[in-house]
Image: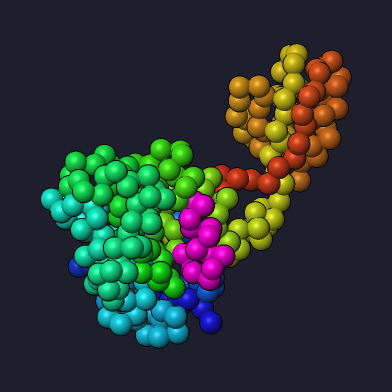
Amino acid sequence: MDAITLENVTKSYDAVTAVSGVNLRVRQGAILGLLGPNGAGKTTTIRMIMNILVPDEGSIKVLDQPVSDSTRDLIGYLPEERGLYPRMKVLDIIVFLAALHGLTEEEAGRRAKEWLERLGLADWSGKKLLDLSKGMQQKVQFITAVIHKPPLVILDEPFSGLDPVNAATVEEIMLEMRSKGSTIVLSTHRMEQVERMCDSICLIDKGRNVLDGEIRAIKQSYGKNTLHIEFTGNDNFLSSPAIINLTRLGNGVEAKLKPGADPQEILKAAVQANVSITRFELLEPSLNEIFIDRTTRA
């Protein structure tokens, strides 16, 4: 069973089509990266899955049920814009929102204290939300999205405001959730985290999904077309016509090759130029490169 199914979903606002004929399947127990430039239609898509918005055309199912108010109760949702009550105390707001998802006050309080301890917020439980930093507030909102152990979690920019240590903790929690059977939709612009965590992606651009599938298969379809070279010596060998783009790094370069180019020709040119090579590796394109390629096409 798929956790989410969208079939030919379209949504317009007056003369603007925000989502146009999107098809999507999210495998149960997987992490999907929902990607796209600003204004691509990601948030509108999420709001339709949440039944906050109703599509003009097409159908949406959540856990094999047509989307409705009852399916919304199966989802833990962290919106990009914070929606918590700033003058409520941290523990009170978590318990209150957990109770709305059906937890008893006693159970909600127990779980809330466990989560606050894990995310380093135990000493702030009696503070008002507005007294917390942006990163702390984000952690509170994350707790409210997952405290009721929903089978489906939708996280829109969950790492916003988090430092690297806290971002790593949230990553760890998300992977734990997946290992226990939860399905996660992750909407973010942080391609390196998508590449580490996600099983598959759906890339939306101008309201349409332009690329979707398993990350490994997508990267393999692009082939290995980037050379990572670390060397000492003259870099004249990099003027080869086989190289169409060059990115200089601190201790080397990344060279994007023309389709069909032979990387051994670059290596031969370096040897002939008496360059000392310490690393010469042919790489698949990064997810960031694929994102840029697919969203900048005419």
Q: Is residue 53 magenta?
A: no
What residue is shown at x 61% (from left), y 63% (from top)?
A: 214
Give the residue at the far bottom of this rendering.
65
Task: Give me the residue at 45% from left, 51% from top.
Answer: 170
Q: Is residue 25 left or right of residue 38?
A: right
| x, y percent for residue 115 | 37, 55
Q: Residue at x 68, y 46 (%)?
A: 284
257 horizontally vs 61: left or right: right
Instruction: Answer yes or no: is residue 32 visible.
Output: no
Q: Is residue 26 placed above or below 140 in the rendered structure?
A: below
- Along the viewing direction, whichever of 281 and 161 lies nearer the viewer: 161
- Residue 134 lies in what quarter of the image? top left
Residue 4 position within the rendered picture, expressed as x and y whole percent measured from the top left: 45, 75
**x and y percentages locating residue 44 in the rendered image:** 31, 65
Image coloring type: rainbow
Q: Which residues are magenta?
A: 171-184
Q: Position of residue 114 (x, y in %)?
A: 38, 57
Quarter occupied by residue 74 = bottom left
Left-right relation of 14 to 194: left
The answer to whether residue 179 is magenta is yes
The reply to whether residue 173 is visible in this rendering is yes
Q: Residue at x 66, y 37 (%)?
A: 256
Q: Main secondary structure of the magenta part?
A: helix
Residue nearer the viewer, 76 or 59: 76
Task: Compare residues 211 and 26 and report the one nearer the observer.
Answer: 26
